[in-house]
């Protein structure tokens, strides 16, 4: 490859010139991986090698067959949700190479999950403590990253929260919280105001009202 100047000269000294540029076309391109498997949320680097090594134009472009699963920028592949995507590198003259990327779900157990409140006192209402989840410094979102289901959360005792992975997350885990019995002193107790003497012991039944 290179340039050369071709000159034609007449017998009386007249001349003309032509500059010739010689290029070497790319004959192929390869990737350092033909397939790769990793968990959602991670990334890795693909390296493209254009042949021959002295090809004039080594520029390449990148594309993904499924950007919802994985995208690519300058060879760096970013993953989002479980599935497969084919990453393609293409030279300017149309030579291609491909890498099939398999994105696996992440166990919700790998996240840091906790309840904002774990202790309550019974007041007649269902308790639904807020779930906080983070992974690798990222705040996870209820509805897109996980779902929440409550059980035994109305009466005094031990309530539970089942956190189930969604989107890039899979699996589930269960957290518990405590509902303490209410103090009877907070209840309203009433009995019949008056009875008629009958000569027998009178044992009225009290009425206990909680929460108003």
Image (spheres, rainbow, N blue to C red):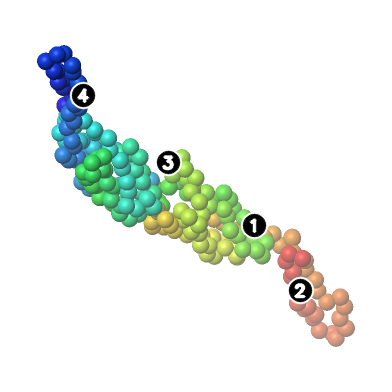
Tag 1 and tag 4, C-beta contact below 8 Å: no
Q: Quadrant of the C terminus?
A: bottom right
Instruction: Compare marks 2 and 3 and give the one earlier in the sequence.
Output: 3
Gap in angstroms between the C-alphas marked 3 and 4: 59 Å
- Neighbor class of circle 1 (other Cα within 10 Å; few <14, some 14-19, many 20+) is some
Decide if residue 103 is on the left or right side of residue 181.
left
Query: Which of the two marks, 1 or 4, is nearer to us in this view?
Result: 4
Q: Quadrant of residue 83?
A: bottom left
Identify the residue under disc 4.
Answer: 19
Gap in angstroms between the C-alphas marked 4 and 2: 112 Å
Between 172 and 181, which is closer to the camera in this rendering? Answer: 172
Numbered circle sitting on residue 131: none
Instruction: Compare marks 3 and 4 and give the one earlier in the sequence.
Output: 4
Gap in angstroms between the C-alphas marked 1 and 3: 34 Å
Instruction: Compare marks 1 and 4 and give the one earlier in the sequence.
Output: 4
Q: Which residue lies at the image location 24% right of the left edge and 33% below the top edge?
A: 58
Gap in angstroms between the C-alphas marked 2 and 3: 57 Å
- Neighbor class of circle 2 (other Cα within 10 Å; few <14, some 14-19, many 20+) is few
Extreme residue toward the left, this view: 11
Instruction: Compare marks 2 and 1 and give the one earlier in the sequence.
Output: 1
Numbered circle sitting on residue 136: 3
Gap in angstroms between the C-alphas marked 1 and 4: 91 Å
Q: Secondary structure at mark 1?
A: strand
Q: Which residue lies at the image location 57% right of the left edge and 49% below the top edge?
A: 116
Q: Is residue 173 above or below residue 73?
A: below
């Amino acid at each position: 490859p290179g340039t050369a100047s071709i000159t034609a000269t007449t017998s009386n000294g007249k001349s003309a010139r032509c500059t010739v540029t010689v290029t070497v076309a790319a004959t192929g391109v390869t990737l350092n991986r033909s397939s790769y498997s990793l968990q959602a949320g991670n990334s890795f680097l693909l390296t493209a090698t254009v042949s021959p090594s002295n090809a004039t134009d080594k520029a390449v472009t990148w594309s993904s067959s499924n950007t919802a699963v994985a995208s690519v920028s300058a060879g760096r592949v970013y993953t989002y949700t479980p599935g497969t995507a084919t990453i393609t590198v293409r030279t300017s003259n149309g030579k291609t190479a491909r890498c099939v990327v398999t994105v696996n779900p992440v166990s919700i157990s790998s996240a840091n999950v906790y309840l904002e409140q774990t202790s309550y006192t019974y007041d007649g209402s269902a308790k639904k403590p807020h779930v906080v989840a983070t992974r690798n410094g990222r705040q996870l979102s209820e509805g897109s990253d996980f779902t929440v289901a409550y059980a035994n959360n109305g009466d005094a005792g031990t309530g539970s929260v089942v956190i189930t992975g969604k989107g890039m997350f899979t699996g589930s885990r269960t957290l518990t919280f405590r509902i303490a019995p209410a103090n009877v002193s907070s209840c309203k107790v009433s009995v019949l105001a008056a009875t008629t003497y009958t000569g027998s012991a009178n044992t009225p039944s009290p009425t206990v009202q909680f929460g108003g």
